[in-house]
Amino acid sequence: MRYFDLHCDTLYKVLTESRDFTDPRLHITFSDPLQFEAWTQCFAIWIPDDISLQQSWQLFTRSAELFKNKLPRFGFGLNNHNSKHNALFCVEGGRIIGNDIDKISQLVTYGVKMLTLTWNGDNAIACGALTTCDTGLTSFGRQVIRELELNNIIVDVSHLSDNSFFDVAAQAHRPFIASHSNSRSVCSNKRNLTDEQFDIIKNNNGLVGLNFHGKFLRSDGSASIDDIITHCEHFLSLGGENTVAIGSDFDGADMPHDISGISTIPQIYEQFLKLNYSETLLDKLFYLNAANFYETFDNRDVLL
Ligand SMILES: [Zn+2]
């Protein structure tokens, strides 16, 4: 099978807990041989809301070094579609740029492919999902979106508050992604997308990555692989065949009892197969939708 994962926090964990990428306690571990016919993994560096701008920039540059120096040793091409195993460098938290629009050109220099505009709190760009005063996107945030789009950095709306989401949708000229967000109709949680939000992303040729975090799958905390399928089926019922992808949140979330990490992905695929999903559809969900998005995004002329 082929696999494309829009979000994991492995880079943050390796960096801040001084682990090695082969540590078997990681969800994404390279202690076993790589097992996919093709595999693209987005590696996000998480920028916590409560650290200083200076600390966040240091975290970012150190993670960029780690990404560049270590991942090729495990067979990854960096930002390379033609590589069998491809790693994409992403940032989870627009706080990294502070209120300095020129920082975006530095993100480009470091090879950042996608920026999650907020984490759960507010920053200079927008309000996050757990905001106490949802004032949406700021005027600086509007500039940021334009600048990201001009520089081929994908806008990630996971973690945004509702007003921020709708403001971004009104502002965006290019398709955007919710890299790791489930359905709020299935599991009521502010981190999940309403049907209206899903529809907007779908109609704008974007992507939504299914998140495996237990509490985003099922509010009573007893989530399993079946719940991933339930969220997926709901999105498919909204016409999401070309929109749904995977955004595991590995190494940044509490997994359901029947998922131990990247090694469980083939079992999740099998469980869908048993429900008579065609391999063509499954390949779209597990790989092709995301692969197509990235390829088209990179090759598109930017006319804003
Ligand atoms: Zn997240």
Image: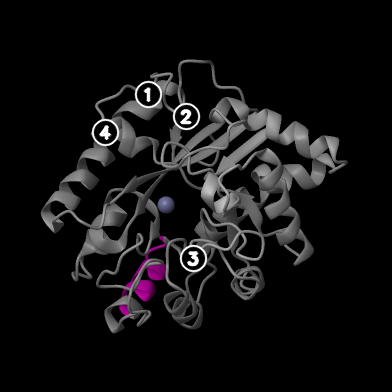
User: Disc 4 to disc 2, how far (Cα)?
Assistant: 14 Å
Residue linked to disc 1: 21
Relative image position of residue 295 (x, y in whole percent) = 57, 53
**Mark 3 element type:** loop
| Residue type marked 2 | Ile
Q: Is 116 in front, or is 216?
A: 216
Q: Sequence order check: which comes first, mark 1 or mark 3? A: 1
Q: Residues within 10 Å of mark 4 (few under 14, many from 20)?
A: some
What mark, if any, has residue 28 been given in the picture? 2
Dot 4 or dot 2, earlier in sequence: 4
Percent position of residue 134, x then y:
37, 79
Decide if residue 8 is on the left or right side of residue 284.
Answer: left
Q: Which residues are magenta?
A: 143-153
Residue in the image at 24% along x and 26% along y: 18
Residue 55's x, y, as percent?
14, 49
Circles 1 and 2: CB atoms closer than 8 Å? yes
Q: Looking at the image, is 125 positioned above or below residue 261? A: below
Local SS, label 2: loop
| Local crowd size for mark 1, using a 10 Å CA cut-off: few (<14), some (14–19), many (≥20) | many
**Does label 2 point to a residue whose CB lies under 8 Å from ligand 1?**
no
Q: Which residue sits furthest front?
A: 220
Q: Is residue 145 above or below residue 154?
A: below
Between residue 271 and residue 152, name the one nearer to us.
271
Secondary structure mostly taken by the magenta-highlighted segment of the chain? helix
Report, in whole angstroms, how far the alpha carbon at label 1 lies from the one at label 4: 10 Å
Instruction: Measure the alpha-carbon separation of dots 1 and 3.
Output: 32 Å
Task: Kindly identify which residue carries mark 3.
Answer: 190
